[in-house]
Amino acid sequence: MKKTIAVYPGSFDPLTIGHEDIVRRIVRLVDHLIVAVAETATQPKSGLFPIDERVELIRSAFADEPRVEATSFCGLLVDFARARKARIIVRGLRAVSDFEYEFQMALMNRSLWPEVEVLFMAPATRHTFLSSSLVREVGRLGGDVTDFVSPVVKARMDRAFERPATD
Ligand code: ADP
């Protein structure tokens, strides 16, 4: 039987427990999941980690899950998905505010590659307020991000902001 391959694209700067929640939900549904860091962000953002470090952190966070692959891509998402035979694109939806942009992107991607399906996943309610940009901001201003990112990401953020690790 053909393997079901999905791609979960994003900036992941950094990976939060909201992203992790979505990943753990998708791997229950597919054979292989590619978490793909977009090298060309669709929305300009002030970055924290370079692309390869974001990929490395995703890889570390899912070291226990052999069906999760972390990588990066540049150019069109549908070109990357097609090349990897991933006919499912996964995006997280936190609130209505995410909807308009995500819906537009989904329809554009399907116009570009009609065989692709975009799957929207809702995270656990307790993660709906989380975004990478907010976590970056809290970290930058000296706040504790322990509850929002996995320990490996927290350690890397502490180093980036040059603070001693708490454990
Ligand atoms: P992008 O720049 O493409 O929005 P992000 O890394 O911010 O990349 O997010 C990647 C995907 O994960 C998006 O679909 C986004 O809606 C989703 N996402 C981000 N944070 C959460 C969260 N806390 N819960 C669920 N989905 C989320």
Image (tube, rainbow, N blue to C red):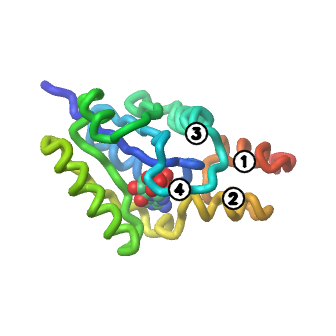
- Pointer 4 local density, CA inside 10 Å: few below 14, some 14–19, many at least 20: few
Point 52% across, 70% down: residue: 129
Q: Is residue 114 left or right of residue 29?
A: left
Residue beneath label 4, please? 44
* Local SS, label 4: loop
- For marks 4 and 1 on the same chain, the one whose residue lies earlier in the sequence: 4
Give above or below for 141 relative to 157: below
Q: Nearer the viewer, mark 3 or mark 4?
A: 4
- The answer to whether the beta carbon of the residue marked 3 is less than 8 Å from any atom of ligand 1 is no
- Amino acid type at image mark 3: Arg
Q: Nearer the viewer, residue 35 or 144?
A: 35
- Spatial CA span between label 2 and label 1: 9 Å
Q: Are marks 2 and 1 in contact (CB under 8 Å)?
A: yes
Considering only order in the chain, which callout, 2 or 4, is on the residue closer to the N terminus? 4
Q: Which callout, 4 or 1, points to the residue nearer the camera?
A: 4
From the top left corner, tell me how far across and down residue 152 is, in percent.
66, 41
Rounded to the nearest whole Å, what is the CA distance between mark 4 and mark 1?
Answer: 21 Å
Q: Secondary structure at mark 1?
A: helix
Q: Say which residue label 2 marks.
A: 145
Q: CA distance from mark 3 to mark 1?
A: 11 Å
Could one spot residue 21 in this view of the protein? no
Query: What is the distance, in whole Å, between disc 2 and disc 3 at their CAs?
Result: 17 Å
Label number found at residue 157? 1
Q: Secondary structure at mark 3?
A: helix
Query: In the image, what residue occupies the spot 28% across and 40% down?
Result: 78
- The answer to whether the residue labelled 2 contacts the one labelled 3, judged by CB atoms less than 8 Å apart, is no
Can you see residue 79? yes
- Pointer 3: what residue? 54
